[in-house]
Each structure stands twice: as structure tokens, then as C-alpha cells.
Amino acid sequence: MAKTKLLISRKLYPEFEGDSLIIALPSGVKTTPKELKSLDDKIDNILSQVLKSEEFGGKASETFIINLFGKYGLRKIILVGLGDTKELNAEQIRKSTAAGIRVAEKTGGEVGVLYSQLPDSLTFEILIKVGVEGALLSLYRFDKYKSPNNDNHKTISSIAFIVPEEVNVIALNRILKTAETIAYMVWFGREITNLPGNEFSPSSFALQARKLAKKPKVKIDVLEKDRLKKLGMNAILAVGQGSEHSPMMIVMEYGGGKKGGKPVVLVGKGVTFDSGGISIKPPSNMDEMKQDMAGGAAVLSAFKAAVELKIPINLVGIIPTVENMPSGGSYRPGDIIKTHSGITVEVLNTDAEGRLILADGLSYAKKFKPEAIFDIATLTGAAKIALGTVGCAILSYDDELIEKLQKASEDTGEKVWRLPLWKEFDKQIESSVADIKNTGGRAGGTITAAKFLGKFAEGYPWAHIDIANVDYAESDGELWRKGATGFGIRLLISLIRNWNS
Ligand code: BES
Ligand code: MN
Ligand code: ZN
């Protein structure tokens, strides 16, 4: 879909001439703020009248359209509420900006955004960062397969963030560019997550990674069947053996940090379609399992951001990617697999495939002597039972890594919640015939899955992010539309950008 030009502008209407001007205000503003007086004069004090009438109350994400029908050279003024100033935070700015943009999108064309009457703590640096994120995140749509005559939405060609004369535009432009790059990485991650199984297979994933190979300080290696066999990666091989598409382990290295410094390793689940395999899933909503590579997409997107933004970090991205299918060649319940780490696993459910491919990914990660390992995966339906669809689950034995994730979460607005890894859960994954089994029963399903993964990351600080409850939206939200949300991409980018601070 078409990208939107973003800019910072010092021009307030009447000089701003576009299609829609979005004015974001907290609740309880009943008179026209002084920077809007000249605009108000020009439009016969309509703004003052609206504010006085209290038809627009400024509640969080409330919108009110003043349609000028182009009479004053501007088609629409869109008022959008920021809610109570005392509760106002960056995430609400994202959401309110998004709400305004969604209204402006109905007209399309050139849009201006102006924030007014905000507390000083919300600096223009913050406003531009989160304003750009809110605008671009809300605009993404998955329309690749829509014929043009079947898709009649309008396009916003530009968004100008309007700031006062005295503000340093050069610094703000840098912030705008960075936020824009990050938001487009979320678009990228959403796009490949939305691609269906027939359009996106493990080799498509590898192709996307290989596109980065020519960038400075980047090395891309894709381990295919022969090498997976030689390395003893029997877990990923087992999960992939039922599909016509061969499994692959994508390994990406970026040396943006100190030469020889230990890297941070990100491991992402890349199941391009999860039918459940021989333990086949019920048909309802099985289509949603095209998104079972959202963790891998998050790792690739964050890796791309590190390269593009030249983040000063040594980073390794590992994406085990497979298609989980039932066939005469599939792995079966009862199979015993010797994983790359040497740990043997009894397969009791072929639908618990994510932890198997991640097991090989996590144990392979140790070869890079990581400073820390994070994995991100659409791992368990139980995550939704535990947390609904509001925030994801994070699990770790390491309080410092949890703290880093919580900090990143505060930065991006993507909520995280820690679940425990109590040792009492270990017995749920004990096997009578192998070292462990790949299911832990219904009780604490997100925890036992993480317990399983932990066995393969032993000896290194490790944290697990389960996004199965948040990666895919069943209906439109403020910052996304139905489909892939890209949850976790900004979280990972924030994590690595602030790694050493
Ligand atoms: N990919 C699924 C988890 C999932 C479910 C993600 C719903 C998004 C929405 C995963 O591979 C899976 O099937 N997990 C099983 C594990 C069980 C068999 C132990 C689950 O959660 O039911
Ligand atoms: Mn599964
Ligand atoms: Zn899965």
C-alpha cells in the first residue's frame, strides 16, 4: 500500500492548506487556545462556538468533525480528544492521533496534526515520536490481494505535524525519521504475517532475510535440510518433515556493536502455517494459523531496524521456520526426538510444534556466546486464557531481563505481564520414556511451554515472550486493523536501542 509523506511544519492555518486539520485537545477545553485564534477568526469563530457548546467534550479518542466544505480553503477540522490531562500519557497520544487519522482518511489528501493545551512534560520530542507511530500504525491495511476496483478507500498523501515557530525542527526531524522507520518495520512485519500459507513458506522467509545480506556488517546464513541434519537439529527436522516445504533455520548476524562483544540473540518462531500436524486442529479459525510466524516476523523486523537505524549493538537473529502439516511423512505422537542440545523429547502432541523448533533455535544460539537470549513466539492458546488480548506474557528466571522488557513496554505501549516459572511446574513436562515431553497439560499451559524452552537456554540469561494472544486481532483496533498487529516489533526494537542504557 502507498506510503504517506511525513513532515514537521511551522505553518499554522491559514497558511496550512490541506484537506483536514486534526486538532488534539484534552478534555474540558471550552475556549479557543491562543495559537488557534487566528484560525478561528478566519472561519467565523466556528471553533469557539463548538468548544463553548460542549458538543465536543475532549474525552479520550473522541472525535468531532467541523466540515468547512472547502469554504475557507480547508475541507475539515477534526477535533480529537486526549482525555483527562492527569491521565494523559504517550500511549493515549498514539491512540488519539490514530483516531483523528482514521477520520481524516475518509477524506484523504493532505493532513495537518496539531496538539494543543498539553502539559509541559509532553515535549515535542515525545509528541512527534508517538504521533508518527499512532498515525502510521493506524493507517496500515492488508490490501495486497484486493483488486483496485474492489477497494475504494482514500489515501492520505501527507501528514504535517504542526509545531510552534520557536521549536528546533532539525532535532524533531531526526526523531520523526526514526519513528517513521520503526513504524514501517511494523508494517513489514504485519505484511509478512498476514501473507497466507500459499504465499509465504519457509523459503519465502529465507528470501526476505537474504535481502539484507548485502548491507554493511550483516551476515545471513540459511541452514537447510542437509546442514540441519549434520548439526543434529532433529526437532526442527521432525516438525517440518510432513510438509512439501523444507524446514530452514535462518541465522542473521549484525555487528553494529563493539568488535568481539557478546551479542544479544533474538529467536523467533517461524511456523508459516500450523495445521497441528497429525494432532490436527479443529477447522474453525484454522486459517488464523497462517500467522504462526509472527514471532519470526518480529525478529526479522527488529533485525532490519537495527541495520537500518545503525543501532550500536551486536545482534543475532535466529528464525527456525517450518510448515506443520499432516501427511504420510509427518512426525507422530509418541515419536522420541534427540534435539540439537542432546535433550531427548517425547512428542505427545504434534500441535505443540513451536517449542520443538525453538528448542533447536535456542540451543544453537549458544554458539554465539550471547549476553542474553530472547525468544518471541505465538506459542500457546493458554496465553489468551491467562491474559486476554490486552498484553503479552513474559517469562524469565532473570529479573534484569524482565526489567528491560518492562522498560521497553513502557516506551512502546505494548503491555507485558510476567508469569512465574516455579519449579513445581517441572514435573508437568516429565516423560517416562525420554528426558521431557512436549506437552504439559492444560493447567498453566503458557508456563509449562516456557519451562520446556528454558531447558534449551540453560547457562545463559534468557527470557521468553508469548504473543499468541496479541499478535492477531479479530477486529479493528485503534492502532491496527483486523489481522496481524505486529505486536512485539516495537518492543524488541526499543529493547535493543536501549540495551546499554
Ligand atoms: N500456534 C499454536 C498456538 C496458538 C493458538 C497461537 C491460538 C495463536 C492462537 C501452537 O502451536 C499450539 O498449537 N499450541 C497448543 C499447545 C498444546 C497442544 C500443548 C495450544 O496452545 O493449544
Ligand atoms: Mn501448534
Ligand atoms: Zn503453532
Image (cartoon, rainbow, N blue to C red):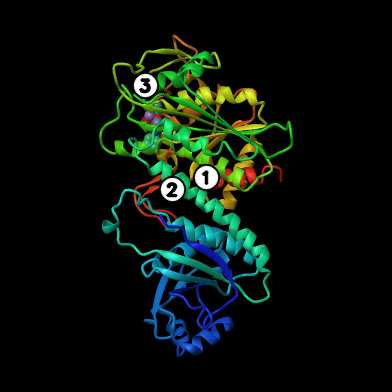
Residue furthest out toward the top: 433
Tell whether label 2 touches label 1 (CB within 8 Å). no
Locate residue 300, reporting x and y percent. Answer: 52, 39
Locate residue 304, reporting x and y percent. Answer: 56, 43
The alpha-carbon separation of the residues under discs 1 and 2 comes to 9 Å
The answer to whether the residue bearing label 3 lies less than 8 angstroms from the nearest atom of ligand 1 is yes
Question: Given the image, on which type of amino acid does mark 2 rest?
Answer: Thr
The numbered dot on residue 489 is 1
- Residue 120's image quarter? bottom right
First reached walking from the N terminus: tag 1 or tag 3 = 3
Neighbourhood count class around disc 2 (C-alpha, 10 Å): few under 14, some 14–19, many 20 upward = many
Neighbourhood count class around disc 1 (C-alpha, 10 Å): few under 14, some 14–19, many 20 upward = many
Residue 500 shows up from this direction: yes
Q: Secondary structure at mark 2?
A: loop
- Residue beneath the point at 48% across and 39% down: 297
Question: Given the image, on which type of amino acid does mark 3 rest?
Answer: Asn
Q: Secondary structure at mark 1?
A: helix
Question: Given the image, on which type of amino acid does mark 1 rest?
Answer: Ile
The numbered dot on residue 243 is none
Q: Secondary structure at mark 3?
A: loop
Residue 442 shows up from this direction: no
The alpha-carbon separation of the residues under discs 2 and 3 comes to 28 Å
Tell whether label 3 touches label 1 (CB within 8 Å). no
Closer to the camera, 458 or 259?
259
The residue to which callout 2 is attached is 485
